[in-house]
Image (cartoon, rainbow, N blue to C red):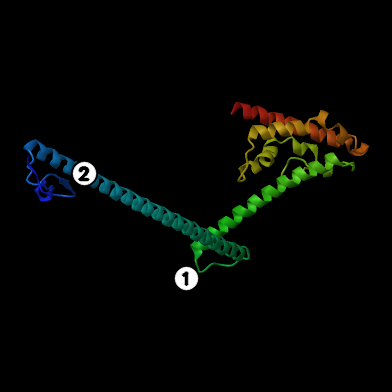
Amino acid sequence: MFSFSRTDKPVLAPISTPGRGYLAFPAGYSLTPEQKLNTLDQQAQRERQEREADQESLNAATAEAEQARISFEQAWQKRQRFQDKRRQALEARERDEALKGEKHWVRQGGFLRDADGRRDERRTEEVRRLVEQEDAERRIRERWETYESVWTRIVSSNEPVVFANLPWPLINPPKSPLDLRNPTGIADFLFESLSLKGNTTTRRDRLRMSLLRWHPDKLGAVLARVPVDDLNLVKDGIDAVVISLMHLQEAEKAR
């Protein structure tokens, strides 16, 4: 019979392999070429996975940094746009205030001066034209607003109506119905306000609304408040206006 002591048992020792970790094999155990190849493949796969994980982490960090940069640039650009708009608004207000002062001075008959204190004829003439244009537009607007407000008052009140206080559609008040047989004069009044800024009314719209307003059938309540002595004069004036408006409407259709 054979007997073995405790020290006679085979001893297993780890065989280290290149790279991370190790594989345990019995002492003196040699790997076959196929096993060595498999071992190296497994190690290479682990290293590749680690590199890929590292690259993904790097890509994520890079993307986060890029997004932060973009967000910062967008915030900076937004701030710059806000500051630009505020500066432009401030400059526009300053120009408006300066122009307002120049127009007031020119209206008083004064002359503008350049940075050296010399008379600035060119700038003075530019501002004078602006003043004349603004004043002309203001007069046109006031004429039309007065015309409309007088009509509203006459239609909504019970006050007597005479030829002199009717809002006839002329720039200068007529002295008689004959002055109202003037399509050109009526056109000058009705159409002049169409050139004002913000107007959306057309010439045809203005003529149509005027014909409705001045049609005798629409003015029964007004004519009822005209004194007998003035009644024929007012009726002749209304007829003259309607005839002039019809001429203008035909001319407008032919354009």
Q: Which mark is residue 204?
A: none
Residue at coordinates 75% horizontally, 47% vertically from top-left? 146
Q: Quadrant of the N terminus?
A: top left
Q: Circle 2 sits on which residue?
A: 46
**Residue 205 place in picture, x, y as percent:** 67, 33
**Residue 177 place in picture, x, y as percent:** 79, 37
The amino acid sitting under disc 2 is Arg
- Specify whether 157 is left or right of 60: right
Q: Circle 1 sits on which residue?
A: 115
Mark 2 to mark 1: distance in Å? 80 Å
Residue at coordinates 82% horizontally, 33% vertically from top-left? 236
Q: Is residue 175 visible?
A: no
Residue at coordinates 74% horizontally, 40% vertically from top-left? 169
User: Which type of secondary structure does the marked residue at label 2 adopt?
Assistant: helix
The amino acid sitting under disc 1 is Ala
**Residue 5 place in picture, x, y as percent:** 10, 48
**Residue 131 place in picture, x, y as percent:** 60, 57
Q: Residues within 10 Å of mark 2 (few under 14, many from 20)?
A: few
